[in-house]
Image: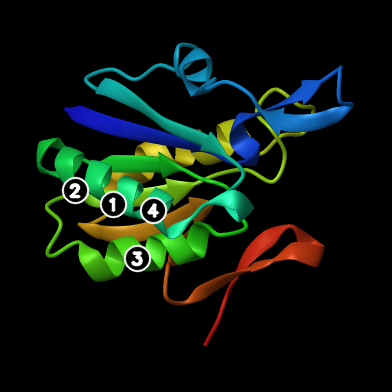
Amino acid sequence: MKLHIITTGGTIEKVYSESSGQVENVAQKIDRYLQSLRLPGVQVEITPLMNKDSLLMTDADRDLILAVVRAKLPDGPVIVTHGTDTMVETGQLLKRKLESPAHPVILTGAMSPLGFERSDGLQNLTESLLASRILPPGVAIVIHNEVHDVDKVRKDRPNARFVPIA
């Protein structure tokens, strides 16, 4: 089975910069974490698309994500790693613009960076890998052991989680 991971940045990809004293998007690092996982029967192709905080994403960035997802989707499920602040917005665009996707499109990210103590990044990544194999075609957010319809969820910033909306 072929599976595509498109990386766009966000907290899941951030690292601590000693020079600035802040966490920043510097380089893609998902591949290092995938190497530690057992993924029998799955060929993972990683496409590092951009490395941005999602609050800095533009309409042109979202159009690029759409174009790459559209190109990869006939080949197998697609996981997009994305910043949580505007993940819903990107997910809604993908849901509107992808006509009858053949496979699931999963958006995931993290509230704290991969490699940081108590990071949720690896959990969310592994849950997305499983979800991409068992969910029906369509667009979903997979985070914190939950699957969300992009039209029925929002980020709850004070509690650092996603919550359903009516």
- Provide the residue designation for mark 3: 93
Mark earlier in primary sequence (4, 1): 4
Mark earlier in primary sequence (4, 3): 4
In this picture, residue 120 sits left or right of residue 59:
right
* Alpha carbons under labels 1 and 2: distance apart: 6 Å
Q: Nearer the viewer, mark 2 or mark 4?
A: 4
Q: Secondary structure at mark 2?
A: helix
Q: Secondary structure at mark 3?
A: helix
- Residue at x 46%, y 34% (from the top left corner): 50
* Dot 1 and dot 2 residues touching (CB under 8 Å): yes
How far across and how far down the image is residue 59, in percent?
42, 59
Sort mark 3 into few (<14), some (14-19) or many (20+) by Cα contacts within 10 Å: some
- Residue at x 16%, y 41% (from the top left corner): 71
How far across and how far down the image is residue 27, in percent?
57, 20
- Provide the residue designation for mark 2: 70
How far across and how far down the image is residue 40, in percent?
28, 17
* Alpha carbons under labels 2 and 4: distance apart: 15 Å
Above/below status of 56 relative to 92: above
Q: Amino acid at mark 1?
A: Leu
Sort mark 4 into few (<14), some (14-19) or many (20+) by Cα contacts within 10 Å: few
- Provide the residue designation for mark 4: 60
> Residue 38 appears in which quarter of the rendering?
top left
Above/below status of 18 relative to 4: above
* Alpha carbons under labels 3 and 2: distance apart: 12 Å
Residue at the right extreme?
A: 21
- Residue at x 69%, y 33% (from the top left corner): 113
Q: Amino acid at mark 3?
A: Leu
- Provide the residue designation for mark 1: 66
Q: Amino acid at mark 2?
A: Arg
* Alpha carbons under labels 4 and 1: distance apart: 10 Å
Mark earlier in primary sequence (3, 2): 2
* Dot 1 and dot 3 residues touching (CB under 8 Å): yes
